[in-house]
Amino acid sequence: MKIAELADRALYGAARVWNRRSMAAVAERDGHVQFEATVAAVTDLNPSMRRITLAAPEFGQYALAGPDEYFGLLMPGADGRLHLPDAERINVRAAVAEMAEEEQPGLRWYTVRELRRATSELDVDIVTHGDAGPGSAWAVRAKVGDPVGFRSGGALYTAFDPARQLFVADETAVPALLAILQERSRRRLPGLGDAVQVHVEVPAAEMLEGLDLPAEVTVHLRGDEDPGTAVLAALTADPSLTEGFDYAWACGEAGLATSVRRHLVSVGMEKRDITFSGYWKLGAARG
Ligand SMILES: Cc1cc2nc3c(=O)[nH]c(=O)nc-3n(C[C@H](O)[C@H](O)[C@H](O)COP(=O)(O)OP(=O)(O)OC[C@H]3O[C@@H](n4cnc5c(N)ncnc54)[C@H](O)[C@@H]3O)c2cc1C
């Protein structure tokens, strides 16, 4: 095994220990797969969200680790062609950095909105925000036939058992949230209501058009305020909104995810009963 690979494993092992202590259990894969896929369809769900369907024979056998499974989308880099990094490295970002600069693919993480093994297809719903960042710039131009790389990830939600659950998401985490709710429904677990409560914060209501968000979801509009501002204000103003939950999932912009988690801990929730993830960071590239 190469020294770089050993260093990756040590780093990932340390991160795993930290995660186990500081948040709810996640679903990890033993090994990773990486392969090329092709854009098979592009659908505008609303002015800020594109559904991109990827096709690859490997999706026919792909098994999800969990309902909010994320994956690395590898996009053509500076030379306009797709070059994939060393598939053996567990640290895909380091593997990309080792490539010649003009060949380095863009890499961003997205959620598997739906996997259809029967047709070897996968849908990903991408929030578009212009050309700021390789992910959005790629998504706004994506067309049928474009090549991309798919790098397997893992899943954060494993908490099917806890009775009362609270979910908080921004627009980037709505695909993951909906996939979790669908899986709960498939398993005939309690749906939205007293036991399962959901808060979604978006800049404007039009960002939710075409997403089939259940009517019971509480929507918070933040307008031009920073992500997290509106939902945190609502949760702190009414203690009944955060009382008596056995588990919480808070994903979206980093400020939203961390401030919601901090608030839940301050009102008595155990860190190990909370899943949280900063999906993006306001004013900073995901890197
Ligand atoms: C586990 C996981 C699952 C995710 N699932 C999804 C998903 O299903 N759909 C989805 O759309 N995103 C998802 N994301 C978030 C996505 O990876 C980030 O938004 C990412 O930063 C987009 O990359 P970019 O190249 O467009 O912008 P970056 O290069 O990362 O950032 C460039 C600039 O754009 C800003 N920016 C980044 N994202 C947004 C945004 N959404 N709105 C406004 N400004 C932004 C940054 O603050 C920065 O200033 C997920 C992230 C993770 C970690």
Image: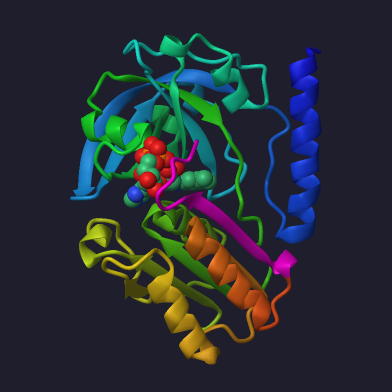
Residue 113, quarter of picture: top left
The residue drawn where x is 23% and y is 56% is 210
Judge whether 110 appears above or below 235 on screen.
Answer: above
Residue 29 versus residue 193 in the image, above or below = above
Q: Nearer the viewer, residue 187 or 154?
A: 154
In the image, ligand 1 is in what quadrant?
A: top left
Looking at the image, can residue 160 be seen?
A: no
Q: Does the segment drawn in magenta span residue 75?
A: no
Which residue does the image show at 49% across and 82% down from the upper left? 235
Q: Quadrant of the N terminus?
A: top right
Q: Name the residue: 36% across, 35% down.
A: 135
Residue toward you, 200 or 211 = 200
Q: Is residue 86 positioned above or below 94 on the image? A: above
What residue span does the magenta drawing correspond to?
A: 271-287
Does any portion of residue 143 appear in the rendered image?
yes
* Residue 171, position as x, y percentages in the image: 36, 57
